[in-house]
């Protein structure tokens, strides 16, 4: 288990106050709200490449931009660890199509299996 994580200050969602945390727990990034896992982005490492496989957010939290937030944090973590990004996950691929901040460290999926 790696200890890369980010805890955001409490935020208001309606009348509730909650704490959001994103952590790399080895093989996946987890998004937790008040300690409850509500989203994941799975990956496998292939040499210097981090191959993203699947991202999902629990249905109760859909439509709040949490998948985008999780993916952005995960990609920033990849940059900080000196790896390269391979987007087999449709959510990660869609994010990279719209945001070009990571173009310099993106590899195409072909030939990285």
Image (cartoon, grey):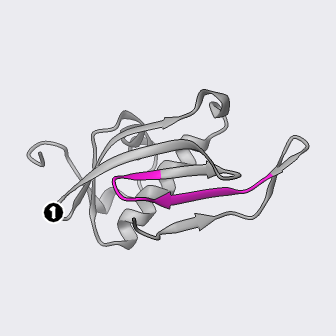
Does the rendering let one see residue 60?
yes
Q: Residue at x 66, y 29 (%)?
A: 60
Identify the secondary structure beneath mark 1: loop
* The N terminus sits in image quarter: bottom left
Magenta stretch: includes residue 90: no
Residue under circle 1?
A: 47
Residue 41, image x, y percentages: 42, 45
In this rendering, position of residue 82 left or right of residue 33:
left
Q: Residue at x 64, y 31 (%)?
A: 63
In this rendering, position of residue 95 left or right of residue 43:
right
Nearest the camera: 111 or 55? 55
* The C terminus sits in image quarter: top left
> Across the whole image, how many numbered discs are drawn on residues?
1
Q: Residue at x 56, y 50 (%)?
A: 31
In this rendering, position of residue 32 left or right of residue 72:
right
Residue 36, image x, y percentages: 64, 46
Q: Which residues are magenta?
A: 18-29
Residue 65, image x, y percentages: 62, 40
Considering the whole magenta stretch, tell me its main secondary structure: strand
Residue 18, image x, y percentages: 78, 52
Nearest the camera: 22 or 111? 22
């Amino acid at each position: 288990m790696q200890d890369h994580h980010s805890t955001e200050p409490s935020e208001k969602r309606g009348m509730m106050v909650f704490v959001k945390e994103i952590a790399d727990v080895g093989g996946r990034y987890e998004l937790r709200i008040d300690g409850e896992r509500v989203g994941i982005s799975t990956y496998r490492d292939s040499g210097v490449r981090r191959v993203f496989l699947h991202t999902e957010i629990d249905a109760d939290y859909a439509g709040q931009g949490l998948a985008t937030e999780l993916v952005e944090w995960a990609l920033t973590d990849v940059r900080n660890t000196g790896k390269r990004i391979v987007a087999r996950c449709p959510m990660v691929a869609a994010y990279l199509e719209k945001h070009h901040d990571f173009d310099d460290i993106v590899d195409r999926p072909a030939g990285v299996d």
